[in-house]
Image: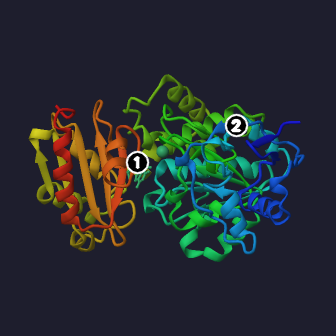
Amino acid sequence: MLRRTLVLKNSCELFVPALRSFQLRRYIMSLAATNDICKKTIIPVEKIPAAKVCDATPRNFGGCHTSCGPAQNFLKKTCLFHTQRKIICPNGSKAAILPPPMQEVRLVYPLLAQPKNIIITTHQKPDGDAMGAALGLYHFLVQLQHTVTFISPTNWANFLNWMPGCDKVMDFENDREAAAGLIKSADLLFCLDFNILHRTKNMEALLTEASCIKVLIDHHQQPQADAFDYGISDTAKSSTCEMVYDFIEASPYRQLLNRDMATCLFTGIMTDTGSFRFSSTTPAVHRAVAALKDTGIDHTEIFEHIYDNFSESRLRFIGNALLNRLEVLYEYNTALMAIPKRDLLKYEIKTGDTEGLVNYLLTIEGIKLGALLIDRTEERKWSFRSKGNFDVNTFARTHFEGGGHKNAAGGRSSDSLEQNVQKFKTVIHAYEQQLQ
Ligand code: 5GP
Ligand code: MN
């Protein structure tokens, strides 16, 4: 039998099932309550993935995240929860922790053999790739007789509303109670096009606590692997839609690929590759697109839905931004654009209307870094794009609470627009060499 082993050096050996965090907490609670944790205890379990045990270092020690009653003090002294499914035991450097491995995504196929309650979700303000991947997978799972709900953490751009299945998407912000109920009773959760749960904004707590099996399919860097049971995280992939296509293609159900699924998946591949322009556009991408095209999709119509649907005010907003909000820092080969709130109001800018604006910055000859800052209601939101080796994922992580990919990343800040511009101009000094 496969099982996870938690070794408490100097004390005991536990076999701990691959439980969700709250179940695991209950398990440890019950052990703690009887003091069994200090004795030799073996808990037999079934169907548990093997895991290696590695040494914990003091930096792995975190606070006790449990809020459960009487055993808490005991736990604080004996067993500290760090992040979900990691257990850290006392004894300092002699303790061991259970690393939370993410099992291969192909192991999910057997779980799809019987009808299940399935939730699909993605990052807040989902873009073409996020919506395409979630809807493509939605159509696939529905055909397999599952009860499927795609819950988006927020609304999405109007120009994605034509996508097949869009009318069935639940917007968490409009339907919190129903969404919470569905998440609590789900068997399986698919997380697409993001890899850190806080990217789901107000859904983070619910998803963290959810007791179901969690699956990740994503192409962003530095995944929060301990939050997922199964999954694939591949930064070399052009898009999550390409990965969902791969997931379907490698499954025993590949014959289910149809025009609706292909339309959704093509949309995300097209938008995330900059219409097959970026270096992530591999031969495999073209092969996937050929298979999608074989289902009869109309790629011209899809392109027009996405790119030829501007309102007049959106076009004038872009004109104003290019004319009045653009600043070129030639010594750093950098173009910066900061959009104040009053512009968003004047041109009645809605979700998605600023998409693509950052790309104009890199169209200036010689510019290697484009930085767009927008004064949103709740925060200031950065978008970074780069050419060549300048790594905006690291840049965004280091200075603006963000992340993403090497050449496309985002960030955020609670400071004012002016403070952000000032900070950007200060921190960019250190990158002068890298930007030559
Ligand atoms: P965009 O500039 O189009 O909003 O985002 C570019 C890329 O960076 C996307 O892949 C997106 O998922 C990622 N990204 C955007 N904002 C954030 C953020 O605040 N945190 C992280 N980790 N990634 C972000
Ligand atoms: Mn993507």
Which x, y percent locates residue 140?
A: 70, 46
Quadrant in which the N terminus is drawn: top right
Q: Residue at point 46% right, 60% down?
A: 125
Disc number placed over residue 403 in the picture, else none: 1
Of tags 2 and 1, the one toward the viewer is: 2
Disc number placed over residue 53 in the picture, else none: 2
Contact (CB < 8 A) between labels 2 and 1? Answer: no
Using the rendered image of the protein, determine whether residue 39 is visible from the camera's viewpoint.
Answer: yes
Q: In which quarter of the image is residue 175?
A: bottom right
- Horizontally, residue 263 falls left or right of residue 33, namely left
- Horizontally, residue 142 falls left or right of residue 223, namely right
Amino acid at the residue labelled 1: Gly
Quadrant in which the C terminus is drawn: top left
For label 2, the SS is: loop
Residue extending farthest to the left is: 331
Q: In which quarter of the image is residue 10?
A: top right
Which x, y percent locates residue 424?
A: 21, 53
Q: How far apart are marks 2 and 1 (CA)?
A: 29 Å
Tag count in the figure?
A: 2
Beta carbon of the mark 1 residue lies under 8 A of ligand 1: yes
- Horizontally, residue 211 falls left or right of residue 158, namely right
66 or 344: nearer the viewer:
66
Amino acid at the residue labelled 2: Val
Relative to 431, residue 312 above or below? below
Relative to 200, residue 430 above or below? above
Tell me, what colour scheme is on the image? rainbow
162 or 418: nearer the viewer:
418
Q: Residue at point 26% right, 58% down?
A: 373
Which x, y percent locates residue 14?
A: 81, 46
| Mark closest to the chain's N terminus, 2 or 1 | 2
